[in-house]
Amino acid sequence: MWTIGLFSCALMSFLNQFFSYRTEPLIVTQITVQVASLPIGHFMARVLPRRSFPVPAFLGGGEWSLNPGPFNTKEHVLISIFANAGYAFGNGNAYAVGIVDIIRAYYYRSISFLAAWLLIITTQVLGYGWAGLMRKYVVEPAHMWWPTTLVQVSLFRALHEKEEFPKGSRQISRSKFFLVALICSFAWYVVPGYLFPVLTSVSWVCWVFSKSVTAQQLGSGMHGLGLGAFTLDWTAVSSFLFSPLISPFFATANIAIGYAVFIYIIIPTAYWGTDLYHAKTFPIFSSHLFMSNGSFYDITKIVDSRFQLDKVAYGKLGVVNLSTFFALSYGLSFATIAATISHVAIFYGKEIYQRFQASKQEEPDIHTRLMRKYDDIPAWWFYSLTVLALTVSLILCTVLNDQVQLPWWGLIFACGMAFIFTLPISIITATTAQTPGLNVITEYAMGLIMPGYPIANVCFKVYGYMSMSQAVSFLSDFKLGHYMKIPPRSMFIIQFAGTIVAGTVNLSVAWWLLGSIPNICNDKVLAADSPWTCPGDRVFFDASVIWGLVGPRRIFGAAGNYGAVNWFFLIGAAGPVVVYIFHRIFPSQKWILMINLPVLIGATANMPPATSVNYNAWLIIGTFFNFFVFRYRKKWWQRYNYILSAALDAGVAFMAVLLYFTLTMENRSVTWWGTAGEHCPLATCPTAKGVDLSLDPTESRVCPVF
Ligand SMILES: *[C@@H]1O[C@H](CO)[C@@H](O)[C@H](O)[C@H]1NC(C)=O
């Protein structure tokens, strides 16, 4: 368990961090480790020597063996929890690493390794402390059932049940299927990953209409609406939104509707119909920040030597503009938060309250009674961890304040916010499988209190929001351990070790790549076929500018252009009320209850950084497997669906790393039409009258003037 667990935790943090800088940041999830570690475990149990050695009495006595017995479910669960510590909640890598990335690759300043390491480790460990303190309320009660965890439980069951075939059957075993799919995926990735990268986003509409800006805006899969764009590259399918094979069809369908409405109705109307917020001066689909005349905003010009907003320069260069798509996607994220809170309050409020009341007096259920066999984790372990992490964070915010900008009161405020929200949000997740993301709220709050300080803002976000969402992720692991009867103390040690290992690996990989790839993340300077464009970090950087450096008052407030976007909070909050009213008027129409507004509005939450080709491919493949295969080939689906997903992820991940070490680092590249980007050069052009980008000597886009 220790060997495979440590190895997979380190490998997964390595891969996720490595990929986070790539244009298609494949996210390797816990399920991949869950599936891939099984054959390795069985293999080790078969070949390791069984000899046992006596252990000296002062070390506890008894016997020690390299091979204590068959590979069992509990070891397997612990391995996957170990690995999950390296997979920060829906994000792939430790969120705090984003701070290091933006400081070094976007602001061109520096942060010391020690400060960065402390920042990453304390945010993760604080979350762990919150989780420990809430365990009694959201893990032990049977009423807190954690629906997503149950999916994992059933996958463990399926993986460990004996495979029996009728005589003469031509079916192949799961592990053989895994191996074959892994090899195919591994081998194929040479093509889109190295020889023919155009296959990542086949935007044939652009190739047909090579002179038309409008056609390319419609057809580009990476900078446009992606009409007709498809992909033959697994990384483009499974980046940003995890693998489509593990998303239930109900969720896929809701996402498809939300996506179609946003991309094919709202954006075209705003862009061509109303020219909302001077939409046509900027590209139709972009996560960059712009000046009012259509040029890119050079943010480094408005940062002064103290790493704060240079108000004089800002006054001269003018306000920061977003593409209409980006502004609306912020609006949707406001609406999503409000809709989640009101949806949960209206449809689950009573249930949550009753479950919470019931869980306070209920008899311990069978799981809890069985778990009593093991020694529980003493509460002081969690208390001392929390106190230690808090102390170290306070030192970071006072002694090393020049590195993180966050004042000590900001830290206390962030921790208070996280602490207050952890319990309600974990109860919501435990009963409804929805986790409201508080990142925008934390950014907004800190941006109002302390505008002008970009790093203070992101540090506040990481302490306030990430420690809370880490806590929810740890709690869901605790529940998994509870269902699978894992000794609590082993869980504690594994999660703690995993957190430290993952954070350290994340940061080391970041340090290595930021120092060794020239112009990493700078997509204006990088060659068209360079994969190092860091789409996720770009959005993180934008957030630090919008909420921290410039501040929400100057963008979404009275002094800004985008004040109306705040109405989305109200729209989001009112949406579920409307659904509820319709439900009460037409109680016989059952489909009304199937409308899940938080999922519908939040469908494009990953956009940016995700682009339309990612969504197209994700939706088609998800529908194919979880609707058609699920419905008409149920046996096949049950046996192989998750295994296929894991094998595709793993094969691509290994090949991408291999390619990097063997070819890219040696500067061996092929150059031809198929490696020169997407071939939609006009998709990022402005279409407003009179905007002439050729007046700007730093501009690399070549566009017609309308
Ligand atoms: C926009 O304004 C900036 C600064 O005033 C200037 O450097 C840039 O060239 C202008 N861009 C265009 C397209 O006119």
Image: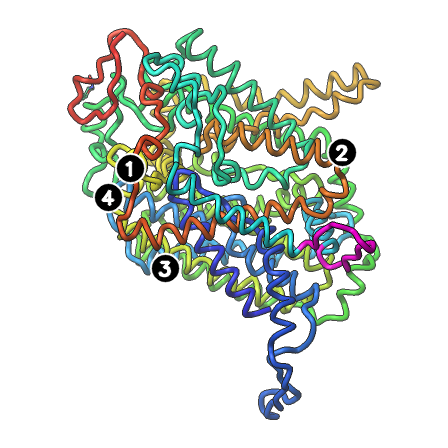
Magenta region: 159-174
Depth order, front residue of 573/612: 612
Farthest residue to the front: give it: 168
State the separation of the CA atoms marked 2 and 4: 55 Å
- Say which residue label 1 marks: 671
In the rendered view, would you say 334 is above or below 428?
above
Find numbered disc 4 in the image and state the secondary structure of the residue it sits on. loop
- Say which residue label 4 marks: 108
Q: Is residue 468 visible?
A: no
- Say which residue label 2 marks: 632
The kind of residue on which mark 3 rests is: Ile
Dot 2 crowding, Cα within 10 Å, few <14, some 14–19, many 20+: few
The kind of residue on which mark 2 rests is: Tyr
Dot 3 crowding, Cα within 10 Å, few <14, some 14–19, many 20+: some
- Say which residue label 3 marks: 395
Which of discs 1 and 3 lies nearer the camera? The answer is 1
Q: Residue at x 64, y 38 (%)?
A: 247
Which of discs 1 and 2 lies nearer the camera? The answer is 1
Which of discs 4 and 3 lies nearer the camera? The answer is 4
In the rendered view, would you say 527 is above or below 190?
above
Question: Whole-percent x and y of residue 19?
Answer: 42, 46
